[in-house]
Image (tube, rainbow, N blue to C red):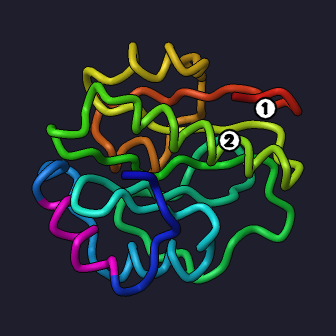
Amino acid sequence: MPWRPMTAADLPDVLALADRLHPGYPESPAVFADRLALAPGFCRMLPGLGYAIAHPWAGQAPPPLDTVLGILPAAPDRLHLHDIALHPEARGTGQAAAVVAALLADATALGLGHAGLLALPGKADYWARLGFRPAAWPPGPALASYGPDALPMERALSRSAP
């Protein structure tokens, strides 16, 4: 089953998956609705199995966890991968790599030069295989909201980004 654009009708499933897969990183329904409203082209759904939420951003540090943005930066320079979540049944199938590649390609087409994320504990090796490297982001509320074990990572984008 391929990834497809997320719609507002998907939000209950997104919330259920988020609660199940990321119980230590709770976010309100308003956050998911906000990201979908602001960056629908960067929100994808793998029905019943996963979701991906990303958005254009400016500067290294992303917004803190569980923060409604209301508006995106006027001059974004990067794509922030906010959340890529897969049900255990879909892991190891290449689905995460496929949606990340699609999101990075869309970000490159938009003219964004970088992609960044906060890797949850135990996930840095996976992101490194996709070309992300540890980054030295300044301390602040965003990093603190994810806990001390989250690792800032980023990668440059180019016209040939996978």
Residue that lies at the very extreme toward the front in this rendered image: 1
Within-10-Å neighbours for mark 1: few <14, some 14–19, many 20+: many
Viewer-proximal residue among 120 and 18: 18
> For this view, does 10 lie left or right of residue 33?
left
Residue that badge 2 annotates: 104
Prevailing SS of the magenta stretch: helix
42 or 68, which is in the foreground?
Answer: 42
Mark 2 surroundings: few (<14), some (14-19) or many (≥20) residues within 10 A:
many
Q: Residue at x 50, y 30 (%)?
A: 152
Asked if residue 83 lies left or right of residue 101, the reply is left
Q: CA distance from mark 2 to mark 1?
A: 7 Å
Q: At which x and y percent is residue 81?
A: 53, 47
> What residue is disc 1 on?
157
**In what quadrant of the picture does the C terminus appear?**
top right
Q: Give the residue type that dot 1 points to.
A: Leu
Q: Is residue 151 left or right of residue 99?
A: left
Residue visible at 22% across and 61% down?
48
Q: What is the x, y in percent for residue 21?
A: 16, 49
Q: Secondary structure at mark 2?
A: helix
User: Does dot 1 land on a helix, a strand or a loop?
Assistant: loop
**132 lies above or below 152:** above
Highlighted magenta segment, given as a residue range = 10-19
Say which amino acid is labelled 2.
Leu
- Label 2 vs 1, first from the N-terminus: 2
Is residue 92 placed above or below 57 in the rendered structure?
above
* 112 relative to 150, above or below: below
Decide whether residue 137 is among the magenta residues. Answer: no
Percent position of residue 6, x then y: 46, 71
**C-beta proximity under 8 Å, tags 2 and 1:** yes
Give how far across and how far down residue 104 sits, in percent: 68, 41
Using the rendered view, name the quadrant where residue 156 is placed: top right
Q: Residue at x 84, y 55 (%)?
A: 110
